[in-house]
Image (tube, grey):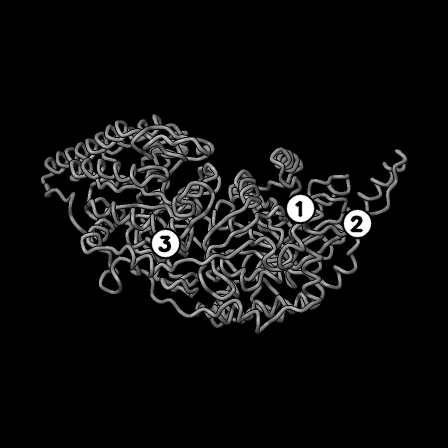
Amino acid sequence: VDCGSFNSGGNPEGQLRVAKEVAEYVAGGGSQIFGLMLHSFLVGGRQSLVPDVPLNYGMSVTEPCMDWTQTVEALNALAASVRQRRDRLYKQQNEAGTIRRSESMQRVSFPEIGQRELLDNLRVQNIRPLISPACVIEEYPSEPEIEQLVLTTRCEVSSLLQHQRNDRLVVIVGPSSIHDTRAAMEYAARLHTKAAELSEQLLVIMQVNLEQTSAAMNWKGMINDPNLDGSYQINKGLRQARQLLVDINRLGLPAAMEFLSTISPQFVADLVSWANIKFNESEAHRELASGLSTPVGFYTSTSGEWKSAVEAVGGSCTPHAFLSVSKQGIAGIVETTGNRDCHVVLHGGDGGPNHEERVVRELSEVLESLQLPARVMVDCGSFNSGGNPEGQLRVAKEVAEYVAGGGSQIFGLMLHSFLVGGRQSLVPDVPLNYGMSVTEPCMDWTQTVEALNALAASVRQRRDRLYKQQNEAGTIRRSESMQRVSFPEIGQRELLDNLRVQNIRPLISPACVIEEYPSEPEIEQLVLTTRCEVSSLLQHQRNDRLVVIVGPSSIHDTRAAMEYAARLHTKAAELSEQLLVIMQVNLEQTSAAMNWKGMINDPNLDGSYQINKGLRQARQLLVDINRLGLPAAMEFLSTISPQFVADLVSWANIKFNESEAHRELASGLSTPVGFYTSTSGEWKSAVEAVGGSCTPHAFLSVSKQGIAGIVETTGNRDCHVVLHGGDGGPNHEERVVRELSEVLESLQLPARVMVDCGSFN
């Protein structure tokens, strides 16, 4: 349980209350909570970063923290609760005549130990060579006509999004996933003909989805698994994907794509006219969007709420500096200008549709108040249609009715469509039906034509309505449906591929930083022992201590961090029979956190993004903390930074539970990993993340030498859920813990959870 965050309402005193509530649960014999998170520093509260104003020593600059006195009180209460639980169990065993010795300190090892490197690649089977983006682009180059098509389409989408006197509707339409290039090209040929017929009313772009989450039929898309057999021939998939996009664009039909990986866009982004991103809370994907040369749509959350999508749009329109990969396949520091053409895509949620006119109006007003593009897109499939192809046609007609009535806050739609309707399963040795989706159900071609015709008719009706109003007012203007509006950035940089990338600076390799600040045998033993202890407690293997992750919400001052660590080490040693205390060392932050992205990204706290300095400083700090004999925990936001520090981390947490890139990362980490519940408070996606991370993966990442590669993992059985509340309030109540544990157990996943005593709790 995260005692901070939503569980405490962001209140330091609230954290102490949550910790005592958990202590009461433990003292009463409760065992489904195996750990807690406490946000704590030397001085309580939080302070703002103000230029030229000195910072208070030992006080957080992001989320509010408890002070040291409150921290000691919380730790003492938790240790006492473990003693009470032991006494209670001893009494029960005494009465039953089954007394056993105390097993609080029993060590249980990871089953993988001895098979691979103990600390750093415990769950990484292999890092295979990855062809560089530059080589694939040279093999399947773009063409002048394609470049003009992509540029024109992007400008058109931007014009419609910004409502710059352009009244067509954008329609993103195509298969939920593409597994068969022949069927995809037949579909593209039909769609190109229909798009040309309706071009005065609709800007039609074909959805070409080439990546899938691991939850999608156990198939991760054409890029990752082009043979559909789990062989993960990714180099083949990247070539095949680029060739397909070239062929579709060559028809004169622009293409759209959903980006799951943060590296794959380097191979294909110059051929994409519109992109969408599912993981709106993921900082790595907001950073990606800030540098993409194309307009980007962020999905609303699976709960249906749109707050985090709005935050993603706002976060992506500002400049960023982050770790990524260049066209040459070398890790680098990417600096972006920000993307003003990001917007929200309403695709419903667990509670049902969210495309109603009331929601659209409310969302548009919020976007406008934040000076963000105030028009939205509606996904006619997904939750809005209940996953039903016929439902998509209904939603499309509802939007058409809204448009025909003069509505202008919806500028586009998404339709999931293929040659044949419905969906089919991937079954070994069973032939697939031609032109039918293997993931989300699609409309058939006939229904697609009906939907497109209805939408085109609605645009004509809206124009007639406006013409009539202008005629009555004496302000008639010519039709502006086809007016072209260019991106303001054009002319400053490459038109198609690095429109919003200012620079790619050199990044020191992980191997060099590790050589500069090496681990030590005593540190390696501490990290290994602590990981085994956490695993033992998580798996409930006859070990009854509580794990307590405690420390600042973020670290900006290494001297204050080391003073805090020294105090915590002394207290941890005193309570070691009852508590396994690990210091939280948060070195990355989201852009929403005080406009400061953490020590790794901005060690000077001035927006200069001296990332190479930050990586060195971060590793040195972790070495120093571990050298005290105090194990360290860390939240991973980037999927590349763990290569620099993961061997020094005994427990990790991940905020972005829906992000496939972060689930892949967790599957290969050598440490136990906690996934936060969503900002709405629901835990379904965190459970899916735990399940998805315990299976093997193959994905694009970076090696210790700073070279892009294909990482193959075995899966991580030590992932679990962290309850940290939500917008609706705390979620650490005993009823929630019990219900969640039962679900986890039924899925054969670790059935114990952690509580964040801060945050929303």
Say which of 93 and 676 sits in front.
Answer: 676
In this view, the residue farthest toward the front is 52
Q: Is residue 360 left or right of residue 580?
A: right
Which of the two discs, 3 and 1, labels the residue nearer the N terminus? Answer: 1
Residue type at the position of mark 3: Pro
Is disc 1 placed on a helix, strand or loop?
helix
**Which residue has dot 3 on it?**
642
**Which residue has dot 2 on it?**
481
Say which of 129 and 257 sits in front.
Answer: 129
Q: Position of residue 276 (x, y in %)?
A: 58, 52
**Which residue has dot 1 on it?**
395
Say which of 17 and 610 sits in front.
Answer: 610
For the N terminus, the quadrant is top left
Q: Look at the image and tell me whether residue 550 can be seen.
A: no
Q: Is residue 700 above or below residue 485?
A: below
Q: Position of residue 702 (x, y in %)?
A: 41, 61
Residue type at the position of mark 2: Ser
Q: Is residue 411 left or right of residue 633?
A: right
Q: Residues within 10 Å of mark 1 (few under 14, many from 20)?
A: many
Give the residue at x 36% y 54%.
642
Q: Residues within 10 Å of mark 2 (few under 14, many from 20)?
A: some
Q: Position of residue 215 (x, y in %)?
A: 46, 56
Say which of 272 and 205 sits in front.
Answer: 272
Give the residue at x 65% y 58%.
495
